[in-house]
Image (tube, rainbow, N blue to C red):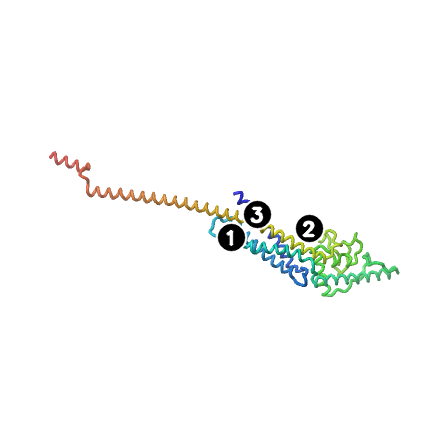
């Protein structure tokens, strides 16, 4: 029973971990901001394949828990063999491929052109804003500003087209998702003061600003200061590290499952033997009841037949015949 509990706990933990990894993988697929590897979308395809492998592994684990729950069936042991083969032929090699992929994916990574274009567009917009700001300061003070900087002086919003808004949304989504700022850091937006770079803003529209994401924008408050994190390096590093992390997790779980599969098989064999012994006991008990019932029926039938024969042909030495003989002899 202790071994069964340990096996069930491992399968359940494996299911929970795989579900978490699958959820993160699906979110990454939906975001579709994977960097290109040597001009190909291999990292995105790897995520798609990972989602399928994780789903397959989760289904095998979930069905295995059901096999433990429902007790002995004829498909228990064959299913363990099938799950072992799936794990050894499909799941484990895929995660090992992910580890290999990590060590050969550092060179040739480039950010998607659409994402890069979004950051370049915002950088140009920030440059125009600071240029107008410097001109406004120069007109007010008569002295041009040496460096682009953000002040309390407000200037008229630059015109925002639908194309510019789309580029803003692309860059802002990446910054919020990966806790980074600009393509190369906060300097892209002209935020040179490291003390205030995480809080500086450039007005984009009446309700939107260009700036570095900070903790107030996130529920978990884990971003911290993001002004020094460029999104280009962040995207390249995060995806490769994520591939390595998930591949290592999957490899460890697959190896452990391969090791404990014989123990799961033995537990199912024990279930089969217990079920068989119970069946034999029930069969013997029902057989004994049937034999006893048949014996009692045979005894009752024999007694009835014997009584009928005696009534029809009484024995010469029976009490009735003896008394009749005595009466006739006296007469």
Q: Residue 67: image x %, image y %?
A: 51, 50
Q: Residues within 10 Å of mark 3 (few under 14, many from 20)?
A: some
Of residues 304 and 98, the one drawn nearer to the viewer in this rendering: 98
Residue at label 3? 10
Name which of mark 3 and mark 2 comes first in the sequence: 3
Name which of mark 2 and mark 1 comes first in the sequence: 1
Quadrant, the C terminus: top left
Q: Residue 249: image x %, image y %?
A: 62, 51
Of residues 228 and 319, the one drawn nearer to the viewer in this rendering: 228
Q: Secondary structure at mark 1?
A: helix
Mark drawn on residue 81: 1
Between tags 2 and 1, which lies in front? 1
Q: Is residue 71 above or below residue 52?
A: above
Distance from disc 2 to disc 1, alpha carbons, whole Å, reads 43 Å
Label 3–label 1 contact, CB within 8 A: no
Mark drawn on residue 220: 2
Q: Residue at x 60, y 50 (%)?
A: 252
Q: Is residue 85 above or below residue 4?
A: below
**Residue 141's quadrant in the figure?**
bottom right
Label 3–label 2 contact, CB within 8 A: no
Q: Secondary structure at mark 3?
A: helix
Name which of mark 3 and mark 1 comes first in the sequence: 3
Distance from disc 3 to disc 2, alpha carbons, whole Å, reads 29 Å
Q: Is residue 158 above or below residue 228?
A: below
């Amino acid at each position: 029973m202790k071994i069964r509990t340990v096996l069930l706990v491992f399968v359940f933990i494996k299911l929970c971990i795989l579900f978490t990894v699958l959820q993160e993988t699906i979110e990454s697929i939906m975001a579709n901001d994977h960097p290109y590897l040597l001009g190909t979308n291999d990292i995105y395809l790897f995520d798609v394949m990972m989602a399928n492998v994780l789903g397959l592994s989760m289904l095998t684990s979930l069905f295995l828990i059901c096999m433990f729950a429902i007790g002995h069936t004829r498909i228990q042991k064959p299913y363990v063999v099938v799950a072992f083969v799936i794990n050894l032929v499909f799941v484990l090699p895929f995660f090992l491929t992910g580890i290999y992929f990590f060590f050969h994916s550092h060179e040739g990574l480039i950010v998607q052109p659409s994402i890069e274009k979004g950051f370049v567009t915002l950088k140009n917009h920030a440059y125009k804003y600071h240029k107008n700001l410097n001109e406004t300061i120069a007109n007010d003070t008569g002295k041009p500003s040496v460096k682009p900087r953000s002040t309390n002086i407000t200037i008229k919003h630059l015109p925002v087209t639908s194309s510019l808004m789309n580029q803003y949304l692309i860059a802002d989504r990446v910054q919020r998702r990966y806790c980074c700022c600009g393509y190369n850091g906060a300097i892209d937006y002209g935020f040179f003061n490291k003390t205030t770079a995480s809080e500086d803003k450039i007005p984009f529209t009446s309700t939107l600003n260009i700036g570095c994401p900070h903790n107030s924008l996130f529920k978990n408050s884990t971003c911290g200061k993001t002004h020094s994190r460029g999104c280009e390096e962040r995207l390249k590093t995060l995806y490769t590290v994520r591939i390595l992390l998930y591949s290592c997790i999957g490899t460890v779980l697959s190896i452990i499952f391969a090791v404990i599969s014989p123990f799961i098989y033995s537990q199912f064999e024990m279930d089969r033997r217990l079920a068989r012994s119970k069946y034999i006991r029930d069969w013997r008990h029902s057989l004994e009841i049937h034999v006893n019932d048949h014996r009692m029926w045979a005894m009752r039938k024999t007694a009835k037949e014997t009584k009928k024969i005696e009534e029809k042909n009484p024995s010469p030495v029976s009490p009735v015949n003896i008394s009749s003989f005595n009466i006739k002899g006296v007469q």
